[in-house]
Image: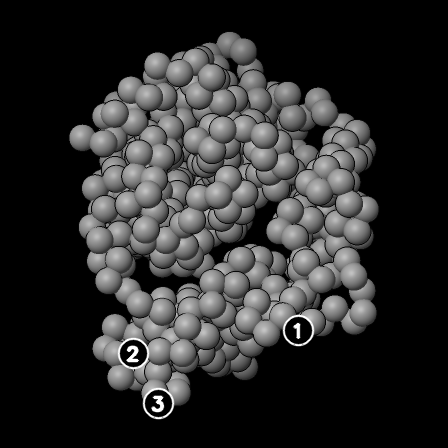
Amino acid sequence: MEIFYGLETIFTSPALMGWVLLAAVVGTVVGAIPGLTASAAIAMLLPMTFYMEPLAALAFLYVIGKSGRYGGSISAILFNTPGTAASAATQIDGYPLAKKGLSSKAMKVATISSVMGDFIGELLLIVGVGYIAALTLRFGPPELFAVYLAAFIVIGSVLGKSVIRGLASALLGVLVNMVGIDPITSTQRFTFGNSDLLGGIELVPIMVGIFVLGEVFAQIENRLMPVAHEVLDDDPKGAAVRNGLTWTEFRPCVPHVVRSSFIGAGIGLLPGLGSAIAAFIAYGEGKRRAKNRDEWGHGALEGVAAPEAANNAVSGPSMAPLLTLGIPGSTIGAIMVGVFLIHGIQIGPTLFVTSKDLVYNLMAAGLIGICAYGLIGYFGAAWIGRFITKVPVNILYPIVLLTAFITAYSSRTNLFDVWVMVAAGFLGWLMKRFDFNPAAFVISFVLAGGAEQAFRQSLLLSDHGLLIFVERPIALSFILLGLCSLIYRVHSFYSNASNGHDKNSA
């Protein structure tokens, strides 16, 4: 019933509806711009939410994240350049369809599949999040630390191509979070005598540097790769018929959409895996089960539907660990942690006791946002693509760069934060270049404070030191889960490496 009250709250508030609709437009457009992501948009807009009401701020960023995931499909189909990492799976069949003059048909399939996947994921979140929260209310500090530890291991080992580099990225995020004053002993840690570091490193300049400035540096290095325009030049005669979508054409996509939605929702529950992994798993599973398997990779509509449904189905369930445990399941969730804390809202199991209405109002905003970006995409995706091609990159990226500097400074009106952003920008660029993982770094940076607090509280409760994590079954289960994930990832990595070596030898 709470979700219906949430929908009523959004519909009866013109201001909230305005923020949700604006977020749908911003996320779709930014997600469709090659080189920019929803994470970058949220990082730049984060300081603006400091002056908004808590629900409006959270709904605005949440819907940008949802619509940004979808927006990446536009550039993947039209330009063969995925707007997000998850859209790389969409371009496999999306761009061949565009080259055949079927770009609008492909985008309609992507839009419907994204909306269906997102709705399924959001409904699963609405139904299940209360039960998860009730369970986590029984967790003490040892169980919470075990969850944090498992999240660090999963995030570090799964994200990226290299297990060692992924874990190193996560460890670096923990170390950066430790800069400042020790919360227990009040001693200085890693400040090197600099008074600006006594308060620690702020989230906003780190986010803007990693996701915005780092991407700008990468685009400069890549010489601002030109966009393919030819797929937009459809012949006006017969274009409407050629790009129309009938039920007969979409019906074979439905089983793929449903299956992929549940794949994406399941992966979304696991911190750190993310929509890119969900999209490629769904694509692989869809191709394996497809009757027209030979068409996949050459312009199959089902090859667009499967990854898009999984990609967007991640969005809702990825909020479950954030809302119930305070553990962000994605980079967007990591940014939203800052919004919760800025507005004095303590996330975790007690959130459903202290701010239950806020949670369900946020989910209601998500449902409305899905409808909004669905309508925008179905009727306006081609127009958005044409608009993007008319914006010169030598104008776009300087504007993004200037906005990044303004964002970093305005969060605390402190010039030191600008230097932190620049340093984080170079760090993000270097991490991408050398196959380290910026997402693992950022999520670990956000998690480290809560993990340290839970660890110290656990030791205070224990008479046997670290054995407290072994003596409590739930804590031990989460630690073993993390270790099993690491072992499986290492085994898969070396198996793939040896198979690749055998093929090269052959």
The tag earlier along the polypeptide, 2 or 1, is 1
- Which residue matches tag 2? 476
Residue at x 21%, y 42% (from the top left corner): 127
Look at the picture and state if 251 lies above or below 474.
above
Q: Residues within 10 Å of mark 3 (few under 14, many from 20)?
A: few
In the drawing, what numbered circle is on residue 109?
none
Q: Residue 169: image x %, image y %?
A: 59, 68
The kind of secondary structure element at disc 2 is helix
* Residue name at image x 23 percent, y 32 percent: 2
Callout 1: SS: loop
Type of residue at label 3?
His
Foreground residue among 445 and 244: 445
Q: Amino acid at mark 2?
A: Leu
| Cα distance between the residues tagged 2 and 1 | 32 Å
Q: How many marks?
A: 3
Q: Is residue 222 visible?
A: no
Q: Which mark is residue 187?
A: 1
Q: At numbered mark 3, what does the secondary structure look like: helix, strand or loop?
A: loop
Q: Amino acid at mark 1?
A: Thr
